Amino acid sequence: MDIKLHQIKCFREVVESGSFSAASRSLGIAQPALSRKIADLETELGKPLLNRSSRGVSLTPAGEKFLRHCRLILLQLSRAEREIALDGSKAADEVVFVVPPALSLFVAAHLVKAVVTDYPNIHVVCRETHWDDARHLMESGQGDVALVTNGHLFDGCEAERCVVDSLYFGGRIDETHHGGAPVTLEEIAGLPLILPGGRFLIRRTLEATARERGLDLNIRHEVNSVPLLATYLEQGLGYTISIWQTFFDGVARGRMFARPLHRPNFQRMLTIVSQSQANQRPAVSIVHDYLRRRVRELHRAGIIRGSE
């Protein structure tokens, strides 16, 4: 049996992307060539690994088993490369991770635990902050890696697209507001709103859009803390406009509703931002990869919504 490493990488990417077309874009390989690589792999193993359909791909029983081994192989190889790159240093290598409040609840602690478990000599420092400060930290080199919306706007940094998501209008379920049907800005502008302060990009975007449409937002409370915002919403002090993660727990418990905003459609690109990968320290590269994996887990679990 002569299975190549590039075949293993291609197989994993097809599975995680959900289709040959998405994987070919991610890998930079023409789709026919990618299909041949997977077909050759299946021939080598003597069993089909994927069920193919117009909707994408799914794993066969043999494919599920092979994927588990592929991930272990690639993880061990990645660890070996990075441990060698770290040169056995005993000193802690600090990596500054920048993240907004609404995402930090789902990402920060999990990321730190995963990294320190595998790499005790990497110290991840989490900086929870708003978009403008995140931009300053990354552009000035004070931040190493960030998970932010529209990071492609940061100068001198590289931004990896994760998903394109939307904004949601939501709050405590009541007789008037419930369900998940789309809603327009015109319908909700006069309702009591709870929004973050003006230094937050989402607040400035909403106010600018409202002005363009001749609307006045009825902002009753200004709250920057995500846990405090959840308390305000549960007490029925108003509604908010935010990303899906803000409402996820309340919706899951049947206590909140979240309706996507459309007309206008506030689409935003969730990105992983870093300095030039060509000059990245090995420790930063490790955190970057673990962050990418965590975002994919959250997307599969429905905690992060949007199209890849």
Image (cartoon, rainbow, N blue to C red):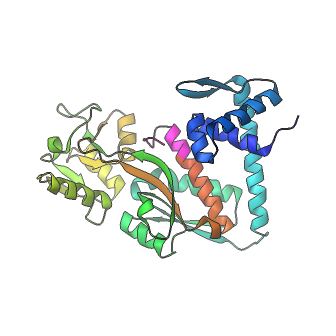
* Front residue of this view, candidates 305 and 196: 305
Quarter of the rendering containing residue 153 = bottom left
Residue 290, image x and y in percent? 61, 53
Q: Is residue 280 visible?
A: no
**Residue 18 versus residue 139 in the image, above or below:** above
Stretch in magenta: 296-308
Q: Residue at x 49, y 52 (%)?
A: 161
Q: Residue at x 67, y 33 (%)?
A: 35
**Residue 234 versus residue 117 in the image, above or below:** above
Residue 304, image x and y in percent? 45, 43
Q: Residue at x 71, y 28 (%)?
A: 63
* Front residue of this view, candidates 211 and 20: 20
**Residue 54 versus residue 83 in the image, above or below:** above
Q: Does the magenta portion include 300?
A: yes
Give the left or right position of residue 143, taking residue 36 as reference.
left
Q: Does the magenta portion include 10?
A: no
Quarter of the rendering containing residue 52 = top right
Q: Is residue 178 visible?
A: yes
Q: Residue at x 68, y 66 (%)?
A: 282
* Front residue of this view, candidates 240 and 66: 66
* Front residue of this view, candidates 197 and 145: 145
Which of the image's four quarters has the N terminus? top right
Dominant SS of magenta comes to: loop
Residue 305, image x and y in percent? 43, 41
Residue 69, image x and y in percent? 76, 38
Quarter of the rendering containing residue 19 = top right
Give the left or right position of residue 219, taking residue 253 as reference.
left
